[in-house]
Each structure stands twice: as structure tokens, then as C-alpha cells.
Amino acid sequence: MGIIVQKFGGTSVSSADKREQVVRKIKNAVDEGLQVVVVVSAMGRVGEPYATDTLIGLAREISKQIRPRELDLLMSCGEIISSVIMVQTLRSHGLDAVALTGAQAGIITDYHFNNAHIKEVHPARILKLLDEGKIVVVAGFQGVTGDGEITTLGRGGSDTTAAVLGVALKAEVIEIYTDVDGVMTADPRMVPQAKPLDSLTYQELCEMAHLGAKVVHPRAVEIAMEGRIPLRIRSTFADGPGTLVADGAPIGSIEIRRDKIVTGLAHLAGMALVTIQSKDDLNENGMVLNVFEIMADSGISVDMIQVAPYQIRFIIDEQRMDQAEQVLSRTGLDVTIEPGFAKVAIVGSGMRGVPGVMAKMVKGLRQAEIAIYHSVDSHTNIACLVKQEVMSKALQALHFQFLN
């Protein structure tokens, strides 16, 4: 009997009506003869008494500072509540289910509170419960250190939980349920013409996730890719097949093919462009190393990096502008930081080795009268920096150019 891992986000479990839709998805898998492991995110939202933000707010009424260890204890509660409520819902439908915390599910992490990394998974308890005919509901986003400290996995942690369990259990598929019909060619809020994709490769989805697509966390995609477990991105509230994510090898009757150069678009808003100028060669005076060591020591992530003898350019999150300006002033170099930018990117494994893709991208943006301020590329994506005020227009132009 095969195993399926189904992950449901907070939106999917936030109300009784929505949880009924979740039960329907789980029951469909059971009826297909599959053993089901369910991973749930926290169901609470700001203002509700059991919401994670509400609990954190209660603690901060006493003191603004919460030690990372105690903060993880607090943040793990939301998913535990969600898992128990989901079990109660399943049992009300006559389905035998049991809830497990991340620790009880055998997820062992390092000691990086609030952003722990999973070291290993011991799935014996889950396998035993599955063999007993139970549906196992696991609280996402959390694990435990070797000596029993509760940890949380950081942003996208429930996706990561689903992925590591899928690999450890050698599942047939990992299903990530959201409130959209699958991975879209672009964000439909930016590009009304966006449409769902039937399939794409792990690498394409990973690139899109890193470049701003919110449908699944990139680490979860990387884990599934390492274990060669197919992912399927589906809607909790619709019956469509969603988007199949694999490595291009045949899966059942489906084979992922890359006929199009570009699979989809992604974007990141709220970026600032940093430009550093010097009259002296920045390579010879050691300032290239100095600049990037300063940024690293300050915990500021840099992207779209361009280094030349007399100029360094890169982008950072706008929220780190003041800090970046302060630490870079120590270099004595001419530093300007300009906010109001967005990164727009085309993604597709089909562009590897194909000439003219950049020319086509520039043509699409030029026809829309959109200026390019910076660009970077890899084998599977090309990203351009544009003014944020024209980001939606840029995405629509690129969608028309490559995906119509």
C-alpha cells in the first residue's frame, strides 16, 4: 500500500467549512487505497484567541523581548492546535486519525531556534500508526533537538515538514494544498492572463520560489528533488489535478516536456539598488572583499550582484536601506542607495543554450516603454530590475511576449 503526504496551509484549515473540504481530499486518498500522512499549518489569525500572533502579543505585554527558546515553544502551539482540531474533524467523519507533534513524528533538528534545520527524520512511529490503519496528522513547522528542545523551522516550515516526511516515508507523492489551482504562469494579481501550469520541473519551481512565487517554499522543493519524490500543487477548494512537479522523467502516464523556452514568471518587490563608485580599482585595493564582508557581517542579503573595477552594484531589501547606508559609509566610498525597484524574471529550463532569449525579453520591455536598470541570468532564469511602479506592466509585457 502506497503512502501519500498531504500538506494543508492555514487558509485551508481556518474554518469548519474549509476543513470539510480538507476531509474530502483526505478521504479521496483513503478510497484510492493510500496510507495518508497529513501535515497542517496553524489555523489561527490575528485577533483569534489561539492565534500564534495573539499568544506572542500576550507574552510581549509583559516584556518585548522573548528568548528564542521560549518563542519557539510558543510558536509551535498553533500547529499543534490545528492538528488536534483536524483529527477531531476526521474522527467525526468516521476516519481513524491520530495527531503528532513534530517531535513525536521523529523530526530532529539543530539548535537554531526560530529557523532550525532538519538533521534527520525517524519515521518508525508514523509507519507503525499507518500499519494500524490510522491517518497520521502531523503538526508542521516544528521539530526537536537531540536533547528534547522544541524548535521551529522558519518561513515555509510546514512545506519543509511535508517534504522531509515524504522523502523519509518514500511516499508516492507529496501534495501541497493551497487556495489556488496550482502553479500559475505568473501572479494572477499582477497578470490577469496568467494560467495554471500542468507540469514543470523541480528546478523551474525552485527558481520561481526563490524569485518570489509564494506557492511553495523553495527548500521543500529542493528536499523533494533530492529524494526524487514528485510534488503536486493543488487547490483545497477545487477538483482539478493541479501542477505536477518532477524531474522530467515519466510518472505514470504523464511526462514533463519542455517545449516552451519560458515556463513562468516571478517577481520580488520592495528592492533598493546599491551603487558603489570609486576612482581607484576596487579589486586592487581590496574593497570588493571589504564591501561584501561588511554586508555579510551585518546580516544583509545581497542579490543581482555586478562587480567591475570601479563600480559595485547589487540590490537589497528596502527595509535594510538605513542599516546598509550606515555600515557602507565606513568604506569611504561613494555609495548611493535608491529605493523603489522590483525584480522581474522569466524562468524555464527550455532557455538553456538558446540564443536570443535576452533580446526577446528586452524587446518585450522596450515595447512597453519600461527601462531596465540591472540584469542577471542563470541557465534557467533571466531577471531584470525595473521601477516598482511599472512592475505589473512589465510582467504583463513579458507574459505576452513569452507565454501567450
Image (cartoon, grey):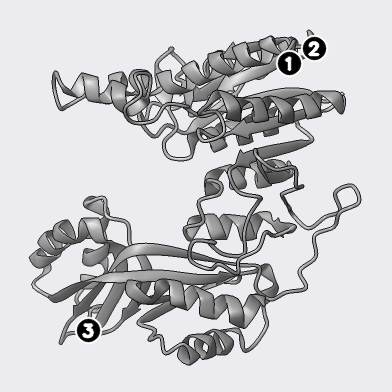
At 37% across and 30% down in the image, what residue appears? Answer: 112
* Position of residue 220 in the picture relative to residue 153 (left or right): right
Q: Secondary structure at mark 1?
A: helix
Label 1–label 2 contact, CB within 8 A: yes
Q: Give percent across and percent down for residue 243.
A: 71, 52
Give the amino acid at mark 2. Answer: Asp
The mark nearer the N terminus, 3 or 2, is: 2
Which mark, by number, is residue 127?
A: 1
Categorize mark 2 by other alpha carbons within 10 Å: few (<14), some (14-19), many (20+).
few
User: Could you tell me which quadrant the N terminus lies in?
Assistant: top right
Q: Is residue 383 visible?
A: no
* Position of residue 194 in the picture relative to residue 392 (left or right): right
Q: Secondary structure at mark 3?
A: loop
Q: Give percent across and percent down for residue 277.
A: 19, 81
* 184 in relation to 98, above or below: below
| Spatial separation of the CA atoms under disc 1 and disc 2 | 6 Å
Residue of label 3: 281
Which mark, by number, is residue 131?
A: 2
Give the amino acid at mark 3. Answer: Asp
Q: Secondary structure at mark 2?
A: helix
Give the amino acid at mark 1. Answer: Leu
Q: Is residue 32 visible?
A: yes
